[in-house]
Image (cartoon, rainbow, N blue to C red):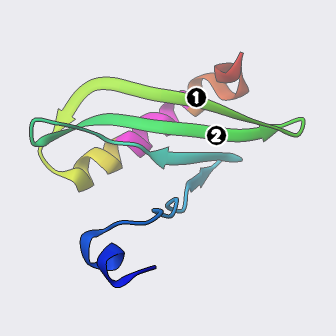
Amino acid sequence: MSFFSKLFGGGKKSEPEPVVYKGFDIFPDLMAEGGKYRLSARIEKTIGGDRKTYLVIRADVFESRDQAESFSIVKAKQVIDEQGERIFS
């Protein structure tokens, strides 16, 4: 990576480590909106050799990024508890 890419944040961003819950991978994918963050997460799981993805997007918005990430993970866990692999149907 060149000096200017490092300086100005260019280059490929690495995927953050997922939160693993009951065999599902949870990635907080926050949406910035007017200085706030909308609750959003991506749930993934490999089933039968295929990588499945489900998006959780809610109307809730938070002032802080950390708070939005925390609640996104909680909401994704709730979806997993309620629906399990049926979310991919």
Look at 64% across and 40% down and name the residue there: 44
Q: Is residue 1 left or right of residue 34?
A: right
Look at 46% across and 79% down and name the residue there: 1
Look at 54% across and 46% down and name the residue there: 26
Q: Does the residue at mark 2 contact the one at mark 1 (Cβ under 8 Å)?
A: yes
Rendered image quadrant of residue 11? bottom left
Q: x, y percentage for residue 9?
A: 31, 68
Quadrant of image for the C terminus: top right
**Location of residue 16 with respect to 25 vertically, above or below:** below
What label does residue 54 carry, if any?
1
Q: Is residue 3 left or right of residue 32?
A: right
Q: Is residue 75 magenta?
A: yes
Main SS, magenta region, reads helix
Location of mark 2 (residue): 44
The amino acid at mark 2 is Glu
Q: x, y percentage for residue 72?
A: 37, 40
The amino acid at mark 1 is Tyr
What label does residue 68 carry, if any?
none
- For label 1, the SS is strand
Nearer to me, 73 or 45: 45
**Which segment did they paint magenta?**
72-79
**Location of residue 29 with respect to 61 vertically, above or below:** below
